[in-house]
Image (cartoon, rainbow, N blue to C red):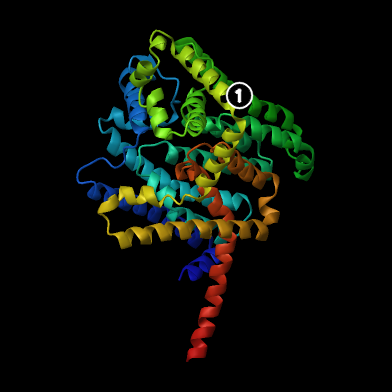
Amino acid sequence: MSTLVRSRAAADPAAGSASLWSLVLAAMVLRMAVLLASLLASNGGRPWIEPDSAAYLETARSLALKGEFSRGDEPEVLRTPGYPLLLALGAAVGRIEATSLVLQVMLGGLSVALVYLLAKELQLAERVALTAAALASVEPLGVLYAGKLLSETLFAFVLLAALVALAAGLRRGHGGALCVGFALLVAAAFVRPIAVFLPLVIWVVVALRSRPWLRQLPATWFKTCSKPIMSLCLIGGIVPAGLWAQRNADVADYRAFSAVSDVNAYFWHAAGVYAKQHRRDLRDVQREWGLASREAYVAAHPEQRVWSQGARYRWMRKAAREILESAPGTFIEQYGQGLVATLIDPGSGALIASLGGQRLPRPLRLILHALAASALAGLYLAALAGLVLQRSRFFTLAGGQVLLVTGYLLVLSGGPVGYHRLRHPVMPLVCVWAAPAWASLAERSGRTRPASSAAAI
């Protein structure tokens, strides 16, 4: 049936559009179903709340009610305002959690459409683009995190939109699309600070490849005005981050885009090295150093009670650097282990926890573990095959940006604790690479099924 639908879609653009929006609707229904199942399994709890959710909710309420980006009695410099702005929509109507979850389910479904558009911009066939969308609609991490009050779903949506615009601009020589792509990359950085250097990295790569790229483009106004447009993209990619860093300096004596890098360096990288050196559990070290809250941190470092936020974070950066420089081998080892764990953790533990955890029958838990692991392995193997089958599409300047973004996000996700959540934003891209192999497999199975039926008759 799926092969028939794809073949009809390939012949009829209207059928292709209908198939795409059917997948978008199915993705929304699946995400809502998993969210409702987790709610039922929680016995009246709030399964969408994770440890990071409280900070997002507090800053969102501050934005909605006071027009300030703050937490407690201090301006917020650890988080950036992108995701809290989405939550603030719910806070404004008085139903912050329910409204935000519905919006995230919708964004999760619309991300499926963006996967399709990205595949089309990379010049993949209609049936392959629909296959990519189908894979993204059921990808486990996308389904799970649409029902969590975390920045993952919004970040993946904005990042996909940026990549679609960049691919369109690079493939067609469309200056407007290129500018929109860089603007969306900046927006993604305000959702998750990990993306703050992406505009600059992509700009440098495009600039280095500009001569052969421009030679391939037809004679258009963009070809004539490419230097001013690229300069505008560079300025647009750097200035907003610089302005936010200046805001942090003005309100908290902290001249950087986000303090999350200093917090991660101290409480994760340095704490991981310290824990291994002293043969202690990482969680015990983090608790002792005050990770749980600002009050816990000040209790662990009473001399910093009167310090500014900026002074505290600068101290964390310095302390982390001293520990990491004292044992670079241990740091590199732990960082590599974290990268591997991020790649291979199927996320089934988090899914099972959302659906009831140990209350689920053991055979069902084992089945869910096996399904999640099989799905991840299937995507990885198909992605490798797809990169080979469609290398002429994926290893272009436009396709190379997708590879570059994936590598950038994964390389920065290492650490003492690898976690599937860090892999979330790259999984839609893996679906695009996996689509050619899965589409080819579906087409072959569609050809052989009638023949085997005829032989049986």
Screen quadrant of the N terminus: bottom left
- Judging by the rendered image, the residue that carries numbered circle 1 is 238
Image quarter of residue 127: bottom right
Image spot of residue 313 (x, y percent): 48, 18
In the image, 430 versus 169, the foreground residue is 430
Identify which residue is drawn at 49% across, 22% down.
Answer: 259
Identify which residue is drawn at 24% across, 46% down.
Answer: 42
Q: How many marks?
A: 1
Residue 340 sits above or below residue 182 on the image:
below
Residue 152 sits above or below residue 252 on the image:
below
In the image, 341 versus 138, the foreground residue is 341
User: Which residue, as the protein is rendered here, is positioned at the far left?
Assistant: 44
Q: Is residue 204 toward the left or the right of residue 103 in the image? A: right
Residue 231 sits above or below residue 107 on the image:
above
Image spot of residue 224 (x, y percent): 76, 33
Which amino acid does the dot numbered 1 rest on?
Ile
Image spot of residue 182 (x, y percent): 59, 33
Question: Badge 1 local density, few (<14 within 10 Å), some, or many (20+)?
Answer: some
Q: Is residue 359 toward the left or the right of residue 445 in the image? A: left
In the image, 440 versus 337, the foreground residue is 337
Q: Secondary structure at mark 1?
A: helix
Image spot of residue 279 (x, y percent): 46, 34
Image quarter of residue 385: bottom right
Res. 7 in view:
yes
User: Which residue, as the protein is rendered here, is positioned at the far top?
Assistant: 306
Res. 180 in view:
no
User: Which residue, as the protein is rendered here, is positioned at the far front?
Assistant: 278
